Amino acid sequence: MANALSSQDYSNLAGAQMLLNIVGIVASALVPLPLSHAVATYAPNSQGRRDGMAFALMVSLIAGMTAACVTGVVVSAFGSSVLAMAAALTAFILFLVAAPLGWMQGEMSFIRYAGVSIAEVLVRLGFSVLVVILALGATGAILGFALGALMILVVPRSFYRDLSWRPAIIKDRWRWAETGDIALTLCIVTALTGADVVVMSFLDGGTDAAAGFQALSTIAKGPIYVAAGTVLVAFPLLRRAGADRRVILVSALRSFGLLAIAAAAVIATVPASLVEFFLPDKYHASISLLPWLAAAGLGYAVLTVLATILLALRAYRRCQLGLIAAALFLPAGMAAGWHLDGVEGVAVGTAVASLASAMTLTLVAFPLLPPTTGRLALQGLLGGGALTLLFLLAGFQPLIWILVVLMTGAGILTGQRRLDTTGPEELREQGERPAARRFRRPQGSQLIRSGLVGFIIVVGVAFGVRAIGLTRGFELWVDEMLYAQLGYSVSLGQLPNLPDGPFMLHPPGYFLVEGAVISVFGISGDHVDLVLHLRWLNAVIGAATVGLAFLLVRKIANTPAAWAAAAVLILEPFVLRNNSRVFLETLGMAAMVGGLLVLVTLMLNPTARYRTARLIAGGLLMGYAVLTKDVYVLGAVLPVIAAALWRETLQVRESLTVVALSAVPYTIYLCVLGFNGLMGTWIWAKTSGVRRMIGLEQSTGFNAEGAPSLLSRVIDQVGQFGSSYLLLALTPITGLVLCFSRHAVRRLLGLTALAFGAFGLYSAAFGTLEEQYGYPVLFAGVLSLAVSTVDLLERRQSMRKPVVVFAVVFTALTAVFGVRALVTVDNGFVQARDWVAQNLPTDARVSVSNSTGELAFEGDDRFGVWPSAPLMEANGANYILTQDHPTSMGYGYAQPAMLEWLEENAVAAFSTNGPTNGITAIWQVDDETLREGAAENIGFPSATYETER
């Protein structure tokens, strides 16, 4: 309707709709709440039930006519008379259908309630389409309310059998006493929650700013509907005789907190591009108000829930005291906001006032709430803050935001469904009857205790975090393009190969998965396009690995340690770095952790069903990790062998079985090579690789000649990877500690961490230490640190406080580094490619200065490898692409002297800065300057000129 109506008409419609929303909320509480108590208390066809339903019918008629008159008068003040009449008719109908709602609540028939509610919404939507097609305007849209509400009258005959016309029932004063208190309270609550939209029709009605405010404020009322659903269930349960109010309140508040805070976080962080998709252009300026309106919606929701709970507990004075404060805060907030900053000020003032009102009513109600309410509120606030931060980060990519929201919602709803309900257990007393169901005492938080739900939440959050920086936060690496080429060759039905022949340095496990993904999804493009597409594959695998790590730590240690480990792995910057690039280690770690999880499960449950099949699956997963990268033999095979020899951690038979099965994937690979006559090539490649790894050949890595020292790199990058370096240092220590644990499964993990930690120490001292090698070491370190902490606390309870403090501080530190990595733009090559596509002349010639640039622009004939002034002049190149960090450290084709000469004599046609490569620039050199540089032989190429590939 926002697109079909003018600003004035839509403003009138929004005001009328909000009034009807208020009427609907009052009607759905004023009549159904007392009626539900009567229906739940008295049996069908009993006199008590008939009296209660007759009184509800009379109240519906009286209140309906009153609401129709009031609504019609208010709407006529800002809208047409026809619109006012339609609103009055709808208000009456909303009260008329209130009795069936109360009957369904009392019968605890919530499935039927949900069904008629869905039918009501569908009828409204269908009628709205007709309104747009037939141009019926605001009046037609309002009549859709009435038509949809009539669907509620479709209830079983048993409702109508108990319904009777007894006008004399209204003389029962005791019924009016309670109904009057409920009516007064709910009228105040609903008037306060909808006042901003209605008041805006008077303050600034007809303007685009006002209409935009009203449209978004209506959307931001989402948490109020969560509150309505909560009180729908809680009120009749709290009013039942003998009800365990503490259990009911804990269940209701936990459910409300999860859903309302999540709804507010979603509304506050929805990307502007998504809102613009359905909101007319003239209202786009109001989108910035959405976070404030979402905060106001959450405050209104808390106000609604607490007021209704106090009504159910018959704490009328406390309820009225809290609402008096709200009645002072909200008008004052709106008035102050309007005078200070117009429409935007009203949004801010409403948010502040609603939250202040909610806090006031919370303090008033606190003595009557369960003792755990404070803890639940704190957990909700912390969780809401984390969820809001996650959604904000995901909002950089709207599609990712949608996916993260859907997965988070699925996790929350799955946890909600695990709350136990049971059948009738209450006895009848003096004609009273039991409700259909009652809440059972919850045995702790099922959301936290459920491994499946935890896995879903962890994977969803981890994927959302990784998706944020895939194309903008992690610079292109030459290895990524080579691995993408290898995967593409597999998709063509070939063995992994590059233009210079078969590739044997690494086994094909990752390339097989790449090839399958490329074939299934039809991925194509140049080297950069292929990498950017395949990064999504690693993001999915990396997220799944974090989920598997959560399950592994949960089994070996406990649930809190699992959540802590997952939180660190989700945001750890070095883990993000690997999971967000096309690197082999991500898949290898996923397979290894999966194999460890299967093996640990069997160790903890020796009599498990399908033991042999599970053992085979665990061994094959371990083997696939090695098939992805040979270094995983240290974590997938060596610890399994050592486990049979060290303190009987693993039975010899099971150890040999797993080792034998882990050899199967690699054996098949070697058989394929032998069949194709490539064993000689494989032996040569592996011999060279082993010599590099153990340090006999130092062509790459920090120990290579001319490379920067490890210490200097650590100092330079401690601001990016401070938590990572600490974890790398702790890995061998925590692994060694776990090797002496009383629990066999923990000793197995300790052996794994110790093997990787020792490998890291050796590589740093003597071997070829490359940054990718740190990923398995660090990942194992996170797992061993979490489990060793639990092991320590089980033996020394006195260490709990310092350990908890360390865990909180370290997790927060990791989050800081991780968030910084996610929000930092670091995609110089992608930006350079975009600039080239839009600005580089078609006859230009450009030199690159390293192998990454060579591969990135390999498909463009204008690019070549001419990294010195003489070579540029000889090949007619007036442009050169450089990255100052790798060049200054001696990596690449160009010498540092060439970069210094360019900075003094050339013009940067394009330039961007990033933490990985520093300044990525495309320099333009005029002909005269280039001739002078060539004569001086500036920038003689490095010894590795065009050999890095």
Image (cartoon, helix red, strand yellow):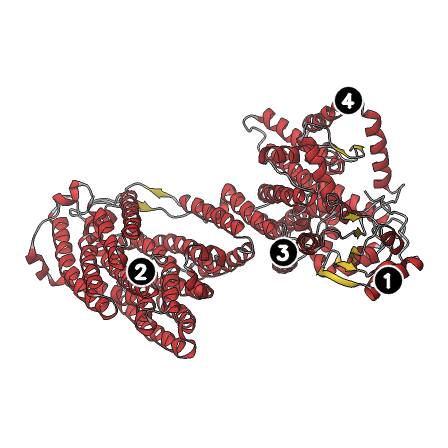
According to the image, label 1 marks what residue? 928
Task: Tell me which amino acid carries mark 2.
Answer: Ile
- Kindly state the secondary structure of the residue where label 2 is placed: helix
> Residue 72 placed where, x, y %?
19, 65
The alpha-carbon separation of the residues under discs 1 and 3 comes to: 43 Å
> Residue 568 placed where, x, y %?
62, 52
The alpha-carbon separation of the residues under discs 1 and 4 comes to: 56 Å
Label 3 vs label 2, nearer the camera: 3
Nearer the N terminus, badge 4 or badge 2?
A: 2
According to the image, label 4 marks what residue? 676
Task: Tell me which amino acid carries mark 3.
Answer: Leu
> Residue 429 placed where, x, y %?
19, 47
According to the image, label 2 marks what residue? 309
Marker disc for residue 889: none
In the rendered view, tell whether residue 496 sits above or below residue 566: above
- Kindly state the secondary structure of the residue where label 4 is placed: loop
Task: Tell me which amino acid carries mark 4.
Answer: Asn
Label 4 vs label 2, nearer the camera: 4
Residue 648 can be seen in this image: no
According to the image, label 3 marks what residue? 822
Q: Quadrant of residue 751?
A: top right
Label 1 vs label 2, nearer the camera: 1
- Residue 315 shown left or right of residue 531 in the figure: left
